[in-house]
Amino acid sequence: MSTNVGQVIRCKAAVAWEAGKPLVIEEVEVAPPEKMEVRIKILFTSLCHTDVYFWEAKGQNPVFPRILGHEAGGIVESVGEGVTELQPGDHVLPVFTGECRECAHCKSEESNMCDLLRINTDRGVMIHDQKSRFSINGKPIFHFVGTSTFSEYTVVHVGCLAKINPLAPLDKVCVLSCGISTGLGATLNVAKPKKGQSVAIFGLGAVGLAAAEGARIAGASRIIGIDLNANRFELAKKFGVTEFVNPKDHTKPVQEVIAGMTNGGVDRSVECTGHIDAMISAFECVHDGWGVAVLVGVPHKDAVFKTNPVNLLNERTLKGTFFGNYKPRSDLPSVVEKYMNKELEVEKFITHQVPFSEINKAFDLMLKGEGLRCIIRMAAVAWEAGKPLVIEEVEVAPPQKMEVRIKILFTSLCHTDVYFWEAKGQNPVFPRILGHEAGGIVESVGEGVTELQPGDHVLPVFTGECRECAHCKSEESNMCDLLRINTDRGVMIHDQKSRFSINGKPIFHFVGTSTFSEYTVVHVGCLAKINPLAPLDKVCVLSCGISTGLGATLNVAKPKKGQSVAIFGLGAVGLAAAEGARIAGASRIIGIDLNANRFELAKKFGVTEFVNPKDHTKPVQEVIAEMTNGGVDRSVDCTGHIDAMISAFECVHDGWGVAVLVGVPHKDAVFKTNPVNLLNERTLKGTFFGNYKPRSDLPYVVEKYMNKELEVEKFITHQVPFSEINKAFDLMLKGEGLRCIIRMGE
């Protein structure tokens, strides 16, 4: 029996104080368990994508400070009132969803979606008294999905604990408390392939590979893995995958490819990506008469599943699943036994291990997409500070051929910087110096540079203008062949080397600008020489998003005076597009956004009317058409969401309507519309950097500001000194403000 029963335990926990910031190892107080609660000592925990998703707080309610973690294994330390099935010393797996055993779902043989203990990502307290069991110096620290396993001790509702075989190694079976069981159960419990049947698995991440493992255990004869990342195919063989399909390798829909491979379709399919197109393909690739498709991945909240109803009438079955249809308390112990009986190979999911003191390394590995599961050993405790951006002294080499070294006076933080700092979905290029919205002064020039000289005021731009290629010579394009944005290249074009170093070690560039440095080296084609009287602390924001939105309206949509314009997405780029409509003299500027809080601010940028799609039961394009007697004259989409892009096109008036797409969609997104919309003389256009040529056109955008035609100040909501640059990241991750100016001299 623990000597701490009924008392507060002080222990180490990794606390997420703010979104996207490294976790900090803190000493926390863990209160005793209350009614129907259990306090457990965590011995091993694992990092899941869900932890990273809520740590980043992208698209959800930010609940901070909190202790993340939900894949773990531990030992019961003490139990609260009413707990009878567990006692100190029992080995348990905490689970993000529960089983109260009293509600209709728990009593049903068909459901595991407990009414009382179903996952709630917003709740940071215990159910019993709506209070947290964690605190630091009396300040509450919030829970995460009822588990919070990134702590040496945690308190969990008894219904969210699976008592397991004490001989099972917790450093292995801890991974069974979330993703692995989800994928495994989706196949074994829901798809239920018969021995010898064929199974298609969409998405070969950890959950998809677990689904493949389930198909292997079931005795499937063919297991076809579908993924856009060809690098995953070799690893997938270890999980029973026998064939591979990369949709990018085919011109026809992947469901047709699979149907051709399998004489009409697979017997079962399991979708583990959460992408709506993959969900549709997973359903349409199963055989008529007996085919079953199971959806596991969580799609975007606005996604809509569309298929011909004949696909259902032809006796295909479509099912959804939650945690693989396992009831945590009743079923998870038997999953552990599958491992103990060598029917389930858990070890191959575990690719890394780190001590608790290095928990942020686990986040780094996942953000870089390296490996499947990283086990965090809770017993090794030591203090280690988090690592946001660190102010370092760097060596900046002289400019080479066609290069310019500039002194950055002011820079700004853009969502693109944050996106590549998080390294989510891209190739991680580190260490690197980020930054691409800035204003500075030329310090020196390299060989061949004639149009700039020391002392000139310039704006560095992430894309360039060589003035020699077909795009640069064209009056219609700004997509320079030589200097178009390249996010993977961390070196200069001239010699494929970096101009930054620390003690001889190269530090990589970012999109050819790297403005988070007091000095940087940039290709001359990526520098716009501007009026030296223009205040650099204002016009620096014109080197990326503001010009992109502004030009999308003025250069591409080109509304005539008195016309109507719809702007989809009221972030900084969308508001810049609205500013362009205001400058053009639009009579009506309709802002469309899912965040009602943005509407009041948008008035400052000329927006006259607002539409929140969530307030309507019909498609937003129909709402706008009714508001405008058939459609707006022009529209600009600044969201990058495929549904918004389609709405932006379908909401313009036939005969003369022009829709412009600015936002960058997901790589797998597909634009779909009735071709009659085009035949009815609507125009659909795309744009890059607002169709501005950086060297030729950006100086004139600055002059618009100098002539008071363009109000730049209203985009600038915060300022911080360079020494506090991480505050700018914090503000953006919290969604506070539009642009934060970073003063480089401080």
Image (spheres, rainbow, N blue to C red):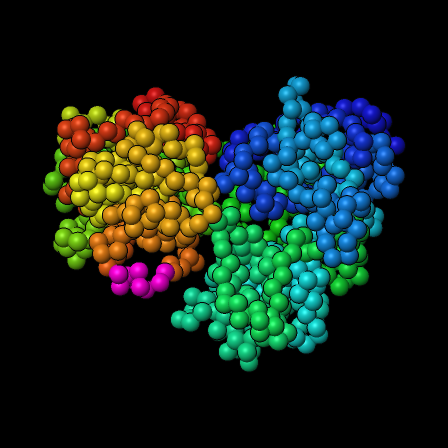
Q: Is residue 151 left or right of residue 302?
A: right
Q: Is residue 502 magenta?
A: no
Residue at 82%, 25% in the rendered image = 6
Looking at the picture, how far across and down is residue 565, in whole percent?
27, 43
Residue at 50%, 36% in the rendered image = 20
Residue at 34%, 32% in the rendered image = 602
Looking at the picture, how far across and down is residue 694, in whole percent?
20, 43
Q: Is residue 739 visible?
A: no
Residue 313 to residue 586: above or below: below
| Highlighted magenta segment, given as a residue range | 673-680
- Which image quarter: residue 127? top right
Q: Is residue 671 left or right of residue 440?
A: right
Residue 439 to residue 310: above or below: above
The C terminus lies in quadrant: top left
Residue found at the far bottom of this picture? 263
Looking at the picture, how far across and down is residue 583, in whole percent?
20, 35
Q: Is residue 677 magenta?
A: yes
How many marks overall? 0
Q: Is residue 322 left or right of residue 672?
A: right
Residue found at the far top of this picture? 137
- Which image quarter: residue 79? top right
Residue 557 to residue 317: above or below: above
Q: Is residue 272 visible?
A: yes
Looking at the picture, how far across and down is residue 663, in whole percent?
35, 47
Looking at the image, which is closer to me, 735 or 741? Answer: 735
Residue at 32%, 30% in the rendered image = 603
Looking at the image, which is closer to me, 468 or 244? Answer: 244
The N terminus lies in quadrant: top right
Looking at the image, which is closer to me, 57 or 371? Answer: 57
